[in-house]
């Protein structure tokens, strides 16, 4: 009885597998037929028509730009005439220059404010990080 049930289950599985293969074959056949009906020359012709339309639109755009007098050369000329970068740079350099002397001739050490030193005998932590560092150093000295 068990062997018979096993053979029946196996037959059902084989039947379902054959049905699935038949459906796949039909789908493949339909795809192949649809692909055979596609006219590649029609698709190429559509691309050529699209390319012609784009080229025509570009030509119209260029013509409008020329008629408006807004050519690339005139835009560059306007940009060159409208900005004086050298004058702006000289003005910025003058603002950065310390009173009474040029930056290029002044050594860096003279341009910096004098350093303030604290006596090394009495450490005075100024921030919480310095205080923590001093605490860790004292613990290290104790070890």
Image (cartoon, rainbow, N blue to C red):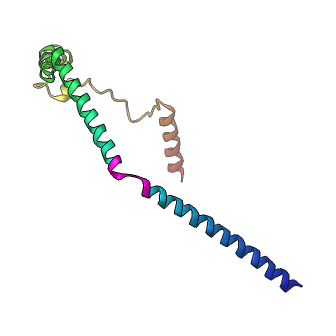
Residue sitting at x 23%, y 33%: 55
Residue 118 or 94: which is nearer the viewer?
94
Residue 33 or 118: which is nearer the viewer?
33
Q: Give percent across and percent down for residue 120.
A: 38, 35
- The total of numbered circles placed on residues is 0
Residue sitting at x 44%, y 34%: 123
Residue sitting at x 11%, y 25%: 104
Looking at the image, is 135 positioned above or below residue 85?
Answer: below
Q: Give percent across and percent down for residue 79.
A: 16, 18
Residue stretch rendered in magenta on the structure: 36-42
Q: Give percent across and percent down for residue 4.
A: 84, 84
- In which quadrant is the N terminus drawn? bottom right
Q: Residue furthest right?
A: 1
Q: Main secondary structure of the magenta part?
A: helix
Residue 6 or 16: which is nearer the viewer?
16
Q: In the picture provided, is 35 more to the left or to the right than 63?
A: right
Determine if the magenta segment contains residue 114: no
Instruction: Name which quarter of the figure residue 103 lies in.
Output: top left
- Whether residue 94 appears in this view of the structure is no
- Whether residue 34 appears in this view of the structure is yes
Q: In the picture provided, is 77 more to the left or to the right than 45?
A: left
Q: In the picture provided, is 118 more to the left or to the right than 85?
A: right
Looking at the image, is 16 positioned above or below residue 114?
Answer: below
Residue sitting at x 79%, y 82%: 7
Q: Residue furthest left?
A: 105
């Amino acid at each position: 009885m068990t062997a018979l049930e096993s053979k029946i289950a196996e037959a059902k599985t084989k039947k379902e597998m054959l049905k699935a293969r038949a459906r796949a074959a039909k789908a493949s056949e339909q795809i192949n037929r649809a692909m055979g009906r596609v006219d590649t020359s029609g698709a190429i012709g559509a691309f050529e028509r699209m390319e012609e339309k784009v080229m025509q639109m570009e030509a119209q755009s260029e013509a409008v730009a020329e008629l408006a007098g807004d050519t690339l050369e005139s835009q560059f000329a306007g940009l060159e005439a409208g900005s004086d970068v050298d004058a702006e740079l000289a003005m910025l350099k003058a603002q950065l220059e310390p009173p009474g002397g040029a930056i290029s001739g002044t050594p860096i050490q003279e341009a910096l404010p004098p350093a303030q030193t604290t006596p090394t005998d009495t450490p005075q932590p100024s921030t919480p990080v310095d205080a923590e560092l001093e605490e860790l150093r004292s613990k290290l000295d104790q070890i």
